[in-house]
Image (spheres, rainbow, N blue to C red):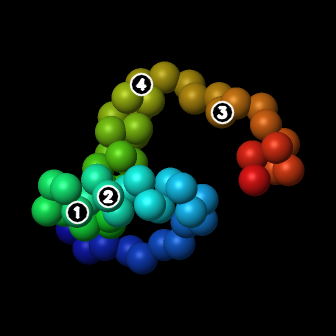
Amino acid sequence: MKSIRTTVSLTAEQLQSLQEMADMNGLSVSWLIRQAVSDFLSQHSDKKFEPLRISRKESE
C-alpha cells in the first residue's frame, strides 16, 4: 500500500513522550503514530464518532 505524507501538530510533551516510547521499543515515531491511527479507525469504524466539542483555543 502506498503511503501519503501528511503533517500533524503535536505539543512538545506529546512528541517527547512518543520519541521516548519509540526509542525504548526500537520503533520510529512515525510507526507509533500510524499504529495509533489504525487502532482509532478500527475502534470507531462501526460507530458514529462525534469528537469532543472543544473550541480551537481551548485545545491549543
Q: Type of residue at label 3?
A: Pro
Give the number of the disc on residue 51: 3
Q: Type of residue at label 2?
A: Glu
Dividing the picture into quadrants, the one containing residue 25 is bottom left
Decide which of tag 3 and tag 4 comes sooner along the chain. Answer: 4
Give the residue displayed 37% in from the left and 29% down from the top.
43
The residue carrying pointer 2 sits among few (fewer than 14), some (14 to 19) or many (20 or more) residues within 10 Å by Cα, namely some
Q: Disc 3 on helix, strand or loop?
A: loop
Which residue is the site of mark 4? 46
Mark 3–mark 4 distance (CA, rounded to whole Å): 15 Å
Mark 2–mark 1 distance (CA, rounded to whole Å): 5 Å
Q: Is residue 26 left or right of residue 53?
A: left
Q: Type of residue at label 1?
A: Asp
Give the number of the disc on residue 23: 1
Which residue is the site of mark 2? 20
Are the residues at dot 1 and dot 3 in contact (C-beta closer than 8 Å)?
no
Q: Disc 1 on helix, strand or loop?
A: helix
Mark 1 vs mark 4: in front: 1
Q: For this rendering, which residue is in front, 9 or 12?
A: 12
Residue 18, percent from left and from top: 38, 56
Give the residue displayed 25% in from the left and 59% down from the top.
22
Q: For this rendering, which residue is in front, 6 or 56?
A: 56
Q: Disc 2 on helix, strand or loop?
A: helix
Mark 3–mark 2 distance (CA, rounded to whole Å): 28 Å
Residue 41 vs 44, above or below: the answer is: below
Is residue 31 at least partly visible in the picture? no
Mark 3 vs mark 4: in front: 3
Mark 2–mark 4 distance (CA, rounded to whole Å): 33 Å
Mark 3 vs mark 2: in front: 2
